[in-house]
Amino acid sequence: MKNQTLYTLAELDKQHILHPSTSPAFNRNNGPTIIFERGEGLHIFDMDNNKYIDGVSMLWNVNVGHGNKELAQVSFDQMQKLAYSSMFYGYSNEPAVKLAEKITSMTPGDLDSVFYTSGGSESNDTAFKLARFYWERKGLANKKKIISLKRGYHGVTVAAQRATGIEVYRAFSGSGDPDIINAEPHLTSCELGDINHPSYQNSIRGTIEREGVNHVAAVIIEPIQGAGGVHVPPEDYLQAVRKLCDEQNILLIADEVICGFGRTGRSFGVNHWDIVPDLMSVAKGITSGYAQLGAVVMRTPIMDAICEVPDMLAHGFTYSGHPTACAVGLKNLEIIERENLIDQADQMGKLLLKGFDYLNDKYHFFHNGRGRGLLTGFDLIKDPEQNITFTPEEAAAMSIVEECKKRGLLIRGFDFEPGMNIIAIAPPLISQQDDIETIISIVDESLSAYS
Ligand code: PLP
């Protein structure tokens, strides 16, 4: 490193790091907004010892909270024993096998086989490839198209980014797998067959009709859309999509990267609607962010069809089944189970929604508090009756995020569409009643300061 002592960390960051999902110009001019140093439970501290409540579990992933010593210990122990070994050429390792057994004991139905990745984007790209490969094995090699939903977020590798239905991502760097098409989300009646609905053409059903069922491999959905602004589907929606996929001989991929492993107060988001997808992408909460790990879980018929192939599977990552990451994952799932964190998330989520009811009564511009478990959000609408939204200059969501930050609470705001002002709150699953009350009271003060 050149002349390290002459520079502050912030200056070095500014000089040497291109940040993900950040304005590079902002960063070059201003440097990083916060440099974190340590974490403890719900809290995260910066270099100046400022303490924040991590109200979105960083990127919806630090589910057991920060500074968990058991996870540090298991990582240390596994690294001493066997930090890394490959899964290529039929090699395996103990933590990877045990974790696969654990994951498949939690997933619904016959989602019984696991392919390991290093994160969510890789999981989704893998799911697309496996879906296409499955149809090839079935003699239907033209089934290649993937239908995803607007406002869905599936990651940033080339295919996952194309599947992402947030325009700024979908269009970035001309990214493209041309066989990935965005449909309108949550059109329950269309998916149930209402061809007279004004948006029918852009529903999943309308898209399948347009593209031709013989060309469609899979539909990918988040059970609850996260980075698109926390959108909970209507009650019958996921069942309608499952039924549609069955009727049309199309695979259903559930992107459980945020929802999976307890965030929504159930083991998986799909458990709220009792459906079994054909493939499930997981990451984030599988290790609570303590190690980089993802996976695709697939149903038995898919695994069986893939296993008929005599040649090698031409897909895999250096870090597929990383022993240390898997040991951390296994311990993390053990902690979630032992501490009853999934039920706790369910209870604390209900408390958050009660807090939203209180804020809804108090602030005219607070609207549509929603969520399941500890995946929650609300809209800021200037005049909900007249449907008048805040202007970009009013920057409602980002102002609330800043007001909360001043008061020691990190939350997330979304304004990627004109008029959109959404706030997401998704604290770690270890949150207790007084933590939820503190979060609501800081949001209350922040809304008050903004109004
Ligand atoms: N899928 C969903 C639902 C996500 O929220 C994310 C990340 O936020 C991803 C996929 C991508 O995961 P990763 O950033 O680990 O590649």
Image: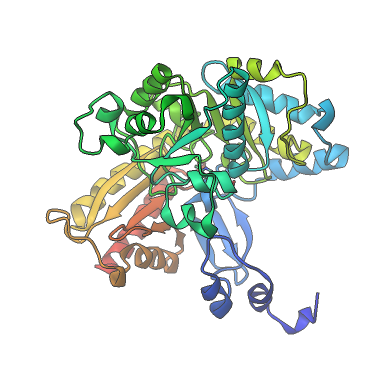
Q: How many marks?
A: 0
Vertical arrangement, residue 280 with respect to residue 29, above or below: above
Q: What residue do we see at 31% from left, 43% from top?
A: 370
Residue furthest right in the image: 81
Residue 183, percent across and down?
Answer: 37, 39
Query: Which residue is at the front of the view, 343 or 16?
Result: 16
Would residue 76 be found to the left or right of residue 367 on screen?
Answer: right
At a point 57% along the width and 38% down the height, the residue shown is: 124
Q: Is residue 260 visible?
A: yes
- Residue 65 visible to an observer of this rendering: no
Q: Which quarter shows the C terminus?
A: bottom left
Q: Quadrant of the N terminus?
A: bottom right
Give the image location of residue 222, x and y in percent: 45, 37
Q: How is the image coloured?
A: rainbow
Q: Residue at x 71, y 34 (%)?
A: 315
Counting from the top left corner in percent of width and height, residue 34 is at 56, 68
Q: Is residue 205 left or right of residue 299?
A: left
Ligand 1 located in image quadrant: top right
Horizontal arrangement in the rendering, residue 153 relative to residue 294 (left or right): left
Residue 151, compared with residue 416, is above or below; it is: above
User: Which residue occupies the foreground of this view, 104 or 164?
Assistant: 164
* Quadrant in the picture for residue 381: bottom left
